[in-house]
Protein backbone atom coordinates (compact mmCIF):
# COMPACT_ATOMS: atom_id res chain seq x y z
CA UNK A 1 0.00 0.00 0.00
CA UNK A 2 2.84 2.43 0.75
CA UNK A 3 4.29 1.74 -2.69
CA UNK A 4 1.02 2.81 -4.29
CA UNK A 5 1.02 6.07 -2.33
CA UNK A 6 4.59 6.72 -3.35
CA UNK A 7 3.70 6.18 -7.02
CA UNK A 8 0.67 8.48 -6.78
CA UNK A 9 2.69 11.15 -5.01
CA UNK A 10 5.41 10.98 -7.67
CA UNK A 11 2.90 11.14 -10.50
CA UNK A 12 1.19 14.34 -9.22
CA UNK A 13 2.04 17.38 -11.28
CA UNK A 14 4.04 20.07 -9.59
CA UNK A 15 2.39 23.50 -9.57
CA UNK A 16 4.73 26.41 -9.49
CA UNK A 17 3.52 29.76 -8.21
CA UNK A 18 2.44 32.31 -10.81
CA UNK A 19 4.88 35.20 -11.04
CA UNK A 20 3.42 38.63 -10.25
CA UNK A 21 2.16 40.63 -13.22
CA UNK A 22 4.46 43.39 -14.39
CA UNK A 23 3.30 46.96 -13.66
CA UNK A 24 1.34 48.61 -16.49
CA UNK A 25 3.36 50.59 -18.98
CA UNK A 26 2.90 54.36 -19.18
CA UNK A 27 1.27 56.82 -16.80
CA UNK A 28 -1.69 55.74 -14.68
CA UNK A 29 -5.06 56.06 -16.36
CA UNK A 30 -7.03 59.20 -15.55
CA UNK A 31 -10.24 58.72 -13.64
CA UNK A 32 -13.37 58.97 -15.76
CA UNK A 33 -15.12 62.32 -15.39
CA UNK A 34 -18.18 62.12 -13.20
CA UNK A 35 -21.63 63.37 -14.09
CA UNK A 36 -23.99 64.33 -11.29
CA UNK A 37 -27.60 63.29 -11.84
CA UNK A 38 -30.78 64.88 -10.48
CA UNK A 39 -34.46 64.40 -11.20
CA UNK A 40 -37.11 67.04 -11.99
CA UNK A 41 -37.73 67.78 -8.31
CA UNK A 42 -33.99 68.28 -7.79
CA UNK A 43 -33.88 70.68 -10.74
CA UNK A 44 -36.87 72.61 -9.39
CA UNK A 45 -35.29 72.92 -5.95
CA UNK A 46 -31.95 74.01 -7.40
CA UNK A 47 -33.66 76.60 -9.62
CA UNK A 48 -35.60 77.96 -6.62
CA UNK A 49 -32.30 78.28 -4.72
CA UNK A 50 -30.63 80.08 -7.64
CA UNK A 51 -28.18 77.19 -8.06
CA UNK A 52 -28.67 76.60 -11.80
CA UNK A 53 -26.43 79.07 -13.64
CA UNK A 54 -27.34 77.55 -17.02
CA UNK A 55 -29.73 74.85 -18.19
CA UNK A 56 -29.02 73.46 -21.65
CA UNK A 57 -31.90 71.74 -23.45
CA UNK A 58 -30.29 69.34 -25.93
CA UNK A 59 -33.46 68.42 -27.83
CA UNK A 60 -34.10 69.51 -31.41
CA UNK A 61 -35.16 73.09 -32.09
CA UNK A 62 -38.68 71.84 -32.85
CA UNK A 63 -38.96 69.95 -29.56
CA UNK A 64 -37.61 72.95 -27.67
CA UNK A 65 -40.13 75.30 -29.35
CA UNK A 66 -42.98 72.98 -28.35
CA UNK A 67 -42.22 73.60 -24.65
CA UNK A 68 -39.16 73.75 -22.45
CA UNK A 69 -38.16 74.45 -18.86
CA UNK A 70 -38.26 78.25 -18.36
CA UNK A 71 -34.87 79.82 -18.97
CA UNK A 72 -33.34 76.81 -20.73
CA UNK A 73 -31.12 77.49 -23.74
CA UNK A 74 -31.28 75.19 -26.75
CA UNK A 75 -28.13 73.47 -28.01
CA UNK A 76 -29.12 70.23 -29.79
CA UNK A 77 -27.13 67.20 -28.69
CA UNK A 78 -25.42 66.84 -32.07
CA UNK A 79 -24.09 70.41 -31.74
CA UNK A 80 -22.81 70.34 -28.15
CA UNK A 81 -19.19 69.48 -29.05
CA UNK A 82 -19.01 72.19 -31.71
CA UNK A 83 -20.60 74.84 -29.47
CA UNK A 84 -18.52 74.44 -26.32
CA UNK A 85 -17.27 78.03 -26.66
CA UNK A 86 -20.80 79.26 -25.87
CA UNK A 87 -20.62 77.43 -22.56
CA UNK A 88 -17.12 78.61 -21.67
CA UNK A 89 -18.40 81.36 -19.31
CA UNK A 90 -19.91 78.54 -17.20
CA UNK A 91 -16.81 76.34 -17.02
CA UNK A 92 -16.14 77.20 -13.37
CA UNK A 93 -19.66 76.20 -12.31
CA UNK A 94 -22.11 73.51 -13.21
CA UNK A 95 -23.79 73.14 -16.59
CA UNK A 96 -27.22 71.56 -16.19
CA UNK A 97 -28.40 69.44 -19.12
CA UNK A 98 -31.91 68.25 -20.03
CA UNK A 99 -33.58 66.52 -22.98
CA UNK A 100 -36.92 64.74 -23.34
CA UNK A 101 -36.35 61.55 -21.37
CA UNK A 102 -32.69 61.50 -20.28
CA UNK A 103 -30.85 59.62 -23.04
CA UNK A 104 -29.58 62.62 -25.02
CA UNK A 105 -28.79 64.63 -21.90
CA UNK A 106 -26.62 61.74 -20.70
CA UNK A 107 -24.75 61.78 -24.03
CA UNK A 108 -24.28 65.55 -23.91
CA UNK A 109 -23.18 65.37 -20.27
CA UNK A 110 -20.44 62.90 -21.19
CA UNK A 111 -19.22 65.27 -23.93
CA UNK A 112 -19.18 68.16 -21.47
CA UNK A 113 -17.41 66.15 -18.77
CA UNK A 114 -14.79 65.05 -21.30
CA UNK A 115 -14.21 68.71 -22.19
CA UNK A 116 -13.61 69.63 -18.55
CA UNK A 117 -17.06 70.97 -17.64
CA UNK A 118 -19.08 69.87 -14.60
CA UNK A 119 -22.39 68.70 -16.05
CA UNK A 120 -25.53 67.90 -14.09
CA UNK A 121 -27.78 65.50 -16.00
CA UNK A 122 -31.51 65.93 -15.39
CA UNK A 123 -32.84 62.37 -15.42
CA UNK A 124 -36.36 61.93 -16.72
CA UNK A 125 -35.91 65.04 -18.85
CA UNK A 126 -38.58 67.48 -19.89
CA UNK A 127 -41.10 64.64 -19.91
CA UNK A 128 -40.44 64.08 -16.20
CA UNK A 129 -40.53 67.83 -15.59
CA UNK A 130 -43.97 68.13 -17.20
CA UNK A 131 -45.27 64.96 -15.51
CA UNK A 132 -44.32 66.45 -12.13
CA UNK A 133 -46.51 69.45 -12.94
CA UNK A 134 -43.73 72.00 -13.35
CA UNK A 135 -44.25 74.83 -15.87
CA UNK A 136 -42.91 75.05 -19.42
CA UNK A 137 -42.64 77.99 -21.75
Image (cartoon, rainbow, N blue to C red):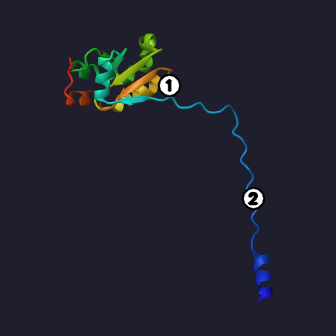
Residue indicated by mark 1: 114
Relative depth, front residue between 7 and 46: 46
Residue indicated by mark 2: 17
- Which of the numbered marks, if any, corresponds to residue 122? none
Would residue 92 appear left or right of 125 to someone viewing this image? right
Between disc 1 and disc 2, whose residue precedes? 2
- What kind of element bears circle 2? loop
Quarter assignment of residue 26: top right
Residue density around tag 2, few if under 14, some if 14–19, many if 20 or more, within 10 Å: few
| Residue 133, placed above or below residue 71 | below
> What residue is shown at x 77% (from left), y 86% (from top)?
4
CA gap, disc 1 to disc 2? 42 Å
Image quarter hosting the N terminus: bottom right
Give the image location of residue 123, x and y in percent: 33, 31
- What kind of element bears circle 1? helix
Q: Residue furthest front?
A: 49
Quarter assignment of residue 127: top left
Give the image location of residue 38, x and y in percent: 35, 29
Relative depth, front residue between 115 and 71: 71
Q: Evaluate whether residue 124 shows in this view.
A: yes
Amino acid sequence: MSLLLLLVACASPTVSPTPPAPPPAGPPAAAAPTVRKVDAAGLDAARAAGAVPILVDVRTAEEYAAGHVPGAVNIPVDQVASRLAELEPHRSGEVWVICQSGRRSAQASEVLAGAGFRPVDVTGGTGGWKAAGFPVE
